[in-house]
Amino acid sequence: MNFHEVSFPLPVAFHSTGGPVRKTEIVTLGSGHEERNAVWAGSRRRFEVGSGVRTLDDLHAVIAFFEARAGRLYGFRFRDFADFKSCAPGASLSPLDQPIGTGDGVATQFQLAKTYASGAGSWTRVITKPVAGTVRVAVAGSEVLSGFSVNAATGVVTFASAPSGAVTAGFEFDCPVRFDSDALSINLASFQAGEAPSIPLIEVL
């Protein structure tokens, strides 16, 4: 996959808009009842970062970033400040935050993941872009301080020796995205009048 392990400018990302998108087909029957079908198994994030561009310097940084990614060609890391931790944004990370597998004494690799649950429903999101140095791991409820490594480009945790028991983790993460347009159309007169340019991003699955 064409991907650059670099982060979109954080000051611009902080003021962006967007979030998860799902695709559902809804058919209304003659009786007025509905039949609903999930076309996508999960969700896909979309962001509009034009709203985060506040100054000409911000705009210059985004243009440079866009050119270095060759438009839509290369993906990159994006910090979604509404959802960038294994816990709530205002909470502290814990190695018990998210279950990522059960050690059977044989397997040594476990994929980072985050589960979103509400009532009887839940969905588990694979985390492929953890922030280096933030991952904490526990086995059977006890934090492991050594004997494992984390691939920051894939989100795979590898143990030196196979663990036994529930494996959990706490971490910060970025969302892998790309520009959703090969063109940046910027009208400086409109920008200086307070109108933000449109700069769409879409998650790379």
Image (cartoon, helix red, strand yellow):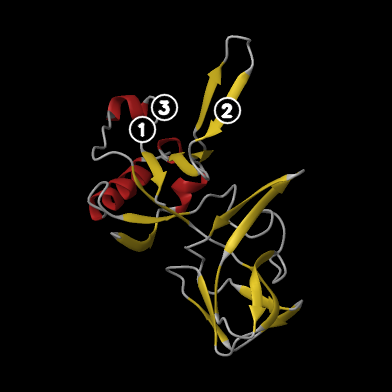
- Disc 2 to disc 3, C-alpha distance: 41 Å
**SS assignment at label 3:** loop
Q: Position of residue 189 (x, y in %)?
A: 29, 25
The relative height of residue 149 versus residue 135 in the rendered view (above or below) is: below
Disc 1 to disc 3, how far (Cα)? 13 Å
Say which residue appears at 38% left-offset and 24% top-offset.
Answer: 193
Mark number for residue 36? Answer: 2
Residue 31's disc is: none
**Between marks 2 and 3 in the image, the one whose residue lies nearer the viewer:** 2
Q: Position of residue 191 (x, y in %)?
A: 35, 29
The quadrant in which residue 101 appears is bottom right
Label 2 amino acid? Arg
Crowd tier of the residue under label 3, counting other residues whose Cα lies within 10 Å: few below 14, some 14–19, many 20 or above:
few
- Residue 53 pos. (x, y %): 41, 40
Residue drawn at 49 percent across, 58 percent down? 174
Residue 84 in the figure: left or right of residue 202:
right
Determine whether 145 is above or below 70 in the image: below
Residue type at tag 1: Ser
- Residue at label 3? 194
Q: Report which residue position mark 1 lands on.
A: 198
Q: Position of residue 113 (x, y in %)?
A: 58, 62
What distance separates the C-alpha of mark 1 from that of mark 2?
A: 32 Å
Q: Quadrant of residue 201?
A: top left
Q: Count of labels shown? A: 3
